């Protein structure tokens, strides 16, 4: 099977919905945004990192858990987020399936997926090349021209099976 890895925030964990409710934010249409003069990092610190532990899993994660025994997560996290992120992963992923976690920025992610011929499930709208990226549809990445865009967890699983070429069960 072709190796597929997963980004965390925006793909598996829905921090944005938590923050929208907590701070009564109407819309987020851009990758970088501020609310009340504060960016996402400041809002998360102000909320004592609760967004990182209380954010709900996405529908993509629910589909992944049904179809995989193990996943590898590649995430770009500030160091002060990591203890909270690990707690969220333990409560929402590893109690159901095994996973590995690598912390790396988007530049390293992009270099690694093309050097090792890996697909990544992502929401980030600023990569140079989207050939090996399965983009989960978000308001802030609608303008991205990509080969693979999915809008539901079922579409994601179908696309992963198609890229595998054998269309066999993933578990």
Image (tube, rainbow, N blue to C red):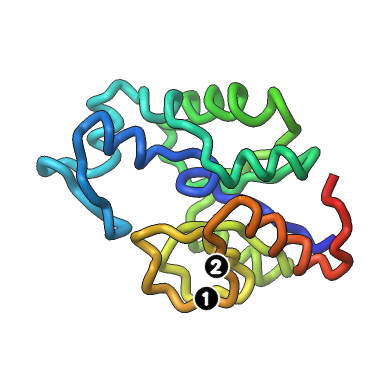
The residue located at (50%, 30%) in the rendering is 85
State whether residue 112 is above or below residue 128: above
In the picture of the structure, the residue carrying the numbered disc 2 is: 149
The residue located at (86%, 52%) in the rendering is 169
Measuring from the top left, give residue 39's x and y in whole percent: 22, 44
Q: Left of 45 or right of it: where is 120?
A: right
Q: Which of the 4 image quadrants contains residue 161?
A: bottom right
Whether label 2 touches label 1, CB < 8 Å: yes
State whether residue 77 is above or below residue 162: above
Measuring from the top left, give residue 112's x and y in whole percent: 64, 63
State whether residue 112 is above or below residue 170: below
Label 1 packing within 10 angstroms: few (<14), some (14-19), many (20+): some
Q: Nearer the viewer, residue 35 or 158?
A: 158
In the picture of the structure, the residue carrying the numbered disc 1 is: 146
Label 2 packing within 10 angstroms: few (<14), some (14-19), many (20+): many
Q: Nearer the viewer, residue 39 or 51?
A: 51
For label 1, the SS is: loop
Q: Left of 24 or right of it: where is 111?
A: right
Q: Nearer the viewer, residue 170 or 79?
A: 170
The residue located at (56%, 62%) in the rendering is 150
For label 2, the SS is: strand
The residue located at (53%, 44%) in the rendering is 8
Measuring from the top left, give residue 60's x and y in whole percent: 59, 46
Q: Left of 135 or right of it: where is 50?
A: left
Residue lying at the far left of the rendered structure? 36
Q: Nearer the viewer, mark 2 or mark 1?
A: 2
Q: Which of the 4 image quadrants contains residue 70?
A: top right
Numbered mark located on residue 155 in the image = none
Measuring from the top left, give residue 147's x and y in whole percent: 58, 77
């Amino acid at each position: 099977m072709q190796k597929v890895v997963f980004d965390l925030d925006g793909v598996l964990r829905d921090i944005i919905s938590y923050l929208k409710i907590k701070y009564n934010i109407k819309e987020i249409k851009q990758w970088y945004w501020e609310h009340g003069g504060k960016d996402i990092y400041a809002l998360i610190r102000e909320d004592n990192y609760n967004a990182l532990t209380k954010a709900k899993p996405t529908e993509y994660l629910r589909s992944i858990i049904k179809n995989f025994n193990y996943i590898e997560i590649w995430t770009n996290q500030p160091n002060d987020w990591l203890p909270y992120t690990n707690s969220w992963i333990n409560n929402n992923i590893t109690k159901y399936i095994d996973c590995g976690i690598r912390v790396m920025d988007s530049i390293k992610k992009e270099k690694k997926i093309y050097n090792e011929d890996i697909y990544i499930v992502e929401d980030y709208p600023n990569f140079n090349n989207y050939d090996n990226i399965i983009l989960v549809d978000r308001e802030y990445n609608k303008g991205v021209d990509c080969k693979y865009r999915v809008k539901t967890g079922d579409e994601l699983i179908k696309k992963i099976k198609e890229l595998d070429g054998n269309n066999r069960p993933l578990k």
